[in-house]
Amino acid sequence: MTSTTLTAGDISAARRGSPAGRILLILGAYLAFALFLLLPLLVVLSEALKLGLGTFFSALLEPDAISALKLTLLAVGISVPLNLVFGVAAAWCVSKYEFRGKSILVTLIDLPFSVSPVIAGLIYVLLFGAQGFFGDVLEKYDIQIIFALPGIVLATIFVTVPFVARELIPLMQEQGSQEEEAARLLGASGWQMFWHVTLPNIKWGLIYGVVLCTARAMGEFGAVSVVSGHIRGYTNTLPLHVEILYNEYNHVAAFSVASLLLGLALIILLLKQWSESRINRLRHTAEEE
Amino acid sequence: MSIEISNVSKRFNAFKALDQINLHINSGELVALLGPSGCGKTTLLRIIAGLETPDSGNIVFHGEDVSRRDVRDRNVGFVFQHYALFRHMTVFDNVAFGLRMKPKGQRPSEAEIDRRVHELLGMVQLDWLAERYPEQLSGGQRQRIALARALAVQPKVLLLDEPFGALDAKVRKELRRWLARLHDEVHLTSVFVTHDQEEAMEVADRIVVMNKGVIEQIGSPSEVYENPASDFVYHFLGDANRLRVDEGEVLFRPHEIALSREAGGGRHSGRVRDIRPLGALVRITLEVEGQDELVEAEVVRDQLLADLSRGDQLYFSPRC
């Protein structure tokens, strides 16, 4: 133990270089952080509060803003649990079984990362829109997907599908399936095995994936913008509502709503940090074994 | 409970892991599946447990065909090489797991579970570790907990996959003697997989020597050692010397040799290349003219060796 810490120390000492260079680099990092991350946040807040707290709250409590918030939370509330199930199922499939086309499946899980969200939205319009592939069938049964909640949820799911699976696949591959086998041998049913053995082992990775997924789902603009139709009070999510307000030169209201999104994002960031530290602690104890 | 394995074959794509295996294991017996890695021994063990399905053939437990039965209904205890303890559970919860997973009607009360778990922990002499987590235990302790966990559900068969493989030499020796003693007490039909011939010799009632998916020989430790059925078994069960004579070769083990300072009596000559003390014995490595392969002799320390040094000329004859 002592010897490993020593070598780690030696390496970092070698890498550290001259003190001046080190200070310069750290200062640069702080400057970039302040300029590109902190400053915009402060601008958002100061713009939102420019006309006082009264205007700030009235922008948030305006019916259209409330409905946008509700829609955002609803879309997140539907798409995140679904992605949680998809993600766990896909990660299970990939890490516990050998089958043909496994590498294609893993690649496909990553597809939403490489496809532009606007394209993803367009795909759904082409599939489910009035002139789309399923347009006639949907019209016959009076089912509205595009410019309605189902379209928004579909687009959100598409964009956020990789987060949970991506987080779980390496974790589950690393853990192998011997504990699951041991559970089966001891008489556990499939469900008991999952609940008592698999789930506790992937718990923190799962929470981390879900948190990332939630953050992305809440902030999604491109894909949702294409399928939503921007109907105020009906199909506007928070990011879309911010855009509309901004385009109407209603800057204070736009920034007020933006700061609401910002607040949600900060809460999620804290959750992420917390789950990440738990994962690292688990990894650490695993390495010590 | 007896185990009957008949005509079991298994392929992994193009690789033939097991080819028509037939094996009968008596009730209460401790059998070792011995062979080099890739010989199919672990696959056979996993097929007995139900973790793998054979392509053909049957597994019969005490007259009852269990080939189609799911893992959880076979009632086998299984011990993994790397323990496979549930890392997020305490030692107590690990051992109690099998009892707690029983269907409601058969599940013992928590008080009964508590009693049984402590009894098992007492048996593996680790009662004081009940509240620890697996990561806080040494390898030998983990393996004993894994064994207690496997025994908790009162299996009819105990299967062990290289149970001592991940442990260091000293712990391994202690633990295998302990396992042999335990088996003497509980007399549970047990099969364990190993690539270590010494381990198989020391623990098993019978040894099944496997190579490339087939059984080379089945017999008691002394049978397979003294009457090996094939060259493979001979070489696998211990070190062997090969000596070229006229137009053939002689195989003999390092201890099957007589050494002398004097020539004659049909003895072969060799030059001492290395001398290594091995506790009660000394290993002398000899270079023999006319062959590249060295000859190793393991002999008791005596006067002959007292002033022997490298480069000396010695005469030897195989005694087999």
Image (tube, rainbow, N blue to C red):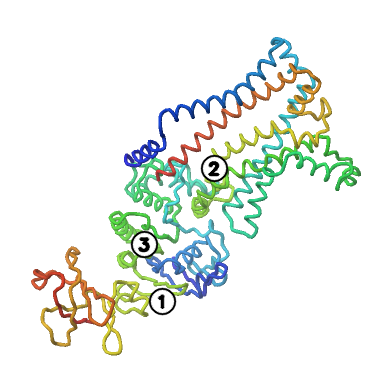
Label 2: element kind: helix
> x, y percentage for residue B275?
18, 68
Residue at the location (36% across, 57% down)?
Answer: B164
Q: Which mark is nearer the camera, 3 or 1?
A: 1
Would residue B32 be found to the left or right of residue A138 on screen? Answer: left
Residue at the location (14% across, 87% down)?
Answer: B265
> x, y percentage for residue A162?
65, 43
> x, y percentage for residue B191?
41, 64
Would residue A30 be found to the left or right of residue B95 on screen? Answer: right
Amino acid type indicated by mark 1: Glu
Q: Are the residues under badges 3 and 1 in a single subunit?
A: yes
Q: Please tell me which of labels 3 and 1 falls first in the chain.
A: 3
Alpha-carbon distance for marks 3 and 1?
27 Å
> x, y percentage for residue A196?
53, 44
Q: Which mark is residue A239?
A: none
Against B185, residue A192 (above or below) is: above
Against B258, residue B97 (above or below) is: above
| Residue sitting nearer the eye, B1 or A238 | A238
Q: Which residue is mark 3?
A: B187
Query: In which quadrant of the rendered image does the N terminus of chain B lie?
Result: bottom left
Against B51, residue A106 (above or below) is: above
Amino acid type indicated by mark 3: His
Against A109, residue A23 (above or below) is: above
Q: Quadrant of residue B175?
A: bottom left
Q: Which residue is mark 1?
A: B216
Q: Which residue is mark 2?
A: A202
Label 3: element kind: loop
